[in-house]
Image (tube, rainbow, N blue to C red):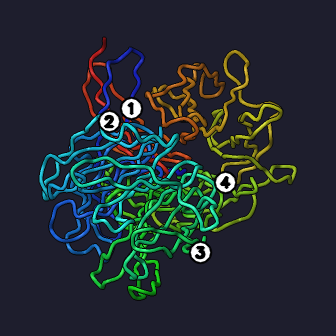
């Protein structure tokens, strides 16, 4: 699955506050390639299911989608530019539907012959939900019919699709399953909505068709224009399988022709394919959702009988931020204009730079590049900024997949960065410094930045924070490892699974507190009850700001004042999703804050309302 950044704005005063959270999707403007995103912080999607259907009866195919754990139906209208992969967001929750959590695979079919499309949702429990369209062909209004398909239960995970397989004028039903294959049901007649199980799809020798190991998703299209429907099927693997229909009009027989009919870019798996003629050239083009939360578009540059799929867009623009599988945000004023800019590192080797073209209190992020500095594919790189040579600009540390730390010195100016690599970071003994995530902070109050580094220790595979004290002078760092790791005020090791940490002064007392994202998706908060020169960390909560990005989602927190109100906002990237932002607040104030959450390297934004003291 993907990871599929989160931003929260939060302030925790000493007193207990009443707090409520409301998601905001467009609070901070974001522009990419000259286009302002309508919903940049909607959170993106994790393992995306899509369907192409003319949901508004205007004669072209629109894009409908639902993400894993999202539970709602999103409608992107085709305003005539669908052939360029350009769709317009209309609604993020048609009919305010709530499918439930986990995987929801969607399909459309006019099951009751009333001229509008009804909605079917394959669920994680192996059942299928039917939502009847009680609106009309151009304005759908879906209503759950609870007794429909009660007799169909394929066990675990279901992925429905419809098509006339026996040439009786009625669309039959295929259901992809977890590992059991693809089930075939025929529709009995037009006067009822009953389906009869026929068989699991098999080869001519009786072998059950399986396009991969598990999580099978079927799709039907007459790809060779011979008058019958052929079968395409995906799985948890990164390929799309093609089964040609070699049977008759009334008795389908699917023959595996190419298990690797299409291999997408990067590792896009869990595909939900949809074949439609988007450009009106009388052949089928291909769209699919995947584990990265993208919608990918292939145009058929061949013919109706001999397809040739050409990649048009690995990720069509859908008005929200989504960086793929994983992302790690950092915020720093890289151009010295008084406001914070946004950087996002991904495990695909990208390092995105969003310049703040607004001001310190009204940020507006403009995407500049995805290669601010070369990243190494396969690692989030954990970018860390700090002035290591006291020249008034920010230098950069990047973690390599090997665990080594690459040091970039800023040889430009505070307003125009020029980052040059000066090699692998070493300690005062000349030994390479290796770990999972570097951090910079003045832990001992001596005016220079010390190095903190999370490392994994045996035998329990938990992460701890090593401290490298800076024994250099103001313009040249020299790090030496301390004999112990970071501990709390009770002299207990500060340790976590999947640790991603940051030090920041949350309560503005002049001492750095510590925040730890964990593999469980929560953020731990340790308050510094010591002093700037002698820190003592007291554990406060394991659910800071109420953030819970989900089990195995690996929260990656970063705190910075992004709106110039002198309190810390919180960004939370996610490994297999992303981001959060929150501002501090006085207990007598009422104020809004932000929470951006990235599913699969995506980004959410929630408004946090902090009320009066209770």
Q: Earlier in the sequence, mark 1 or mark 2?
A: 1
Residue 117 place in picture, x, y as percent: 22, 56
Q: Is residue 208 above or below residue 26?
A: below
**Which mark is nearer the camera, 4 or 1?**
1
**Which mark is nearer the camera, 4 or 2?**
2
Q: Residue at x 54, y 26 (%)?
A: 525
Separation of disc 1 and disc 2 at Cα? Answer: 6 Å
Q: Is residue 343 left or right of residue 204?
A: left
Residue of label 1: 10
Separation of disc 4 and disc 1 at Cα? Answer: 35 Å
Residue 186 place in picture, x, y as percent: 38, 55
Q: Which mark is residue 400?
A: none
Residue 8 place in picture, x, y as percent: 40, 38
Q: Earlier in the sequence, mark 3 or mark 1?
A: 1
Query: For numbered disc 3, what is the local secondary structure?
Result: strand
Query: For numbered disc 4, what is the local secondary structure?
Result: loop
**Which mark is nearer the camera, 4 or 3?**
3
Q: Which mark is residue 475?
A: 4
Please rate how many residues cluster around mark 2, counting C-alpha atoms within 10 Å: few if below 14, some from 14 to 19, many from 20.
Answer: many
Separation of disc 4 and disc 3 at Cα? Answer: 61 Å
Q: Nearer the viewer, residue 358 or 555?
A: 555
Mark 1 and mark 2 in contact? Answer it, CB < 8 Å.
yes
């Amino acid at each position: 699955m993907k990871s599929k950044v989160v931003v929260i704005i939060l302030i925790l005063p000493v007193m207990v506050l009443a707090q409520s959270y409301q998601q905001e999707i467009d609070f901070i403007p974001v522009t990419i390639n000259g286009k302002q995103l309508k919903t940049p912080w909607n959170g993106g999607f994790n393992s995306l299911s899509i369907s192409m259907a003319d949901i508004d009866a205007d004669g072209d195919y629109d894009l409908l989608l639902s993400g894993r754990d999202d539970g709602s139906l999103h409608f992107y209208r085709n305003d005539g530019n669908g052939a360029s992969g350009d769709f317009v967001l209309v609604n993020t929750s048609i009919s305010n539907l709530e499918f439930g959590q986990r995987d929801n695979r969607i399909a459309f079919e006019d099951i009751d012959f009333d001229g509008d499309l009804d909605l079917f949702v394959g669920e994680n429990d192996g059942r299928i939900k039917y939502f009847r369209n009680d609106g009309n062909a151009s304005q759908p209004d879906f209503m759950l019919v609870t007794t429909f398909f009660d007799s169909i239960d394929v066990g675990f995970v279901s992925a429905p699709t419809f098509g006339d397989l026996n040439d009786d004028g009625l669309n039959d039903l295929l259901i992809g399953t977890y590992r059991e294959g693809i089930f075939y049901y025929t529709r009995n007649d037009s006067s009822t909505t009953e389906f009869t199980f026929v068989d699991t799809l098999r080869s001519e020798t009786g072998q059950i068709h399986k396009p991969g190991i598990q999580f099978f998703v079927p799709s039907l299209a007459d790809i060779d224009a011979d008058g019958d429907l052929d079968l395409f099927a995906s799985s948890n693997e990164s390929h799309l399988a093609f089964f040609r229909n070699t049977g008759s009009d009334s008795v389908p027989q699917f023959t595996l022709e190419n298990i690797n009919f299409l291999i997408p870019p990067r590792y896009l798996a869990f595909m939900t394919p949809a074949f439609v003629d988007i450009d009106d050239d009388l052949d089928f083009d291909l769209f699919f959702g995947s584990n990265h939360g993208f919608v990918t578009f292939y145009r058929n540059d061949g013919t109706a009988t001999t397809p040739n799929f050409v990649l048009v867009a690995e990720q069509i623009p859908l008005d929200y931020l989504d960086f793929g599988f994983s992302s790690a945000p950092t915020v720093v004023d890289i151009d010295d204009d008084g406001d914070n800019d946004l950087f996002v590192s991904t495990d695909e080797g990208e390092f995105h730079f969003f310049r703040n073209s607004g001001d310190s209190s009204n940020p507006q992020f403009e995407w500049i590049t995805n290669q601010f500095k070369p990243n190494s594919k396969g690692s989030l790189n954990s970018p860390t900024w700090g002035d290591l040579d006291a020249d008034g600009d920010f230098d950069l540390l990047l973690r390599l997949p090997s665990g080594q730390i690459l040091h970039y010195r800023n040889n430009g100016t505070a307003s125009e960065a020029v980052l040059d690599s000066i090699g692998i970071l070493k300690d005062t003994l000349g030994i390479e410094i290796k770990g999972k995530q570097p951090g910079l902070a003045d832990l001992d109050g001596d005016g220079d930045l010390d190095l903190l580094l999370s490392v994994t220790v045996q035998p329990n595979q938990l992460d701890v924070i090593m401290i490298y004290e800076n024994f250099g002078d103001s313009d040249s760092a020299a790090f030496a490892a301390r004999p112990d790791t970071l501990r709390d005020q009770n002299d207990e090791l500060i340790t976590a699974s999947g640790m991603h940490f940051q030090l920041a002064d949350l309560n503005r007392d002049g001492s750095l507190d510590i925040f730890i994202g964990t593999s469980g998706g929560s953020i731990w908060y340790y308050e510094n009850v010591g002093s700037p020169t002698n820190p003592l960390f007291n554990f406060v909560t394991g659910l800071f700001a109420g953030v819970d990005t989900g089990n195995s989602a690996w929260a990656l927190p970063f705190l910075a004042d992004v709106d110039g109100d002198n309190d810390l906002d919180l960004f939370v990237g996610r490994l297999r999703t992303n981001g959060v932002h929150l501002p501090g607040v006085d207990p007598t104030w009422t104020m809004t804050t932000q929470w951006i959450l990235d599913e699969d390297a995506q980004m959410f934004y929630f408004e946090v309302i902090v009320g009066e003291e209770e």
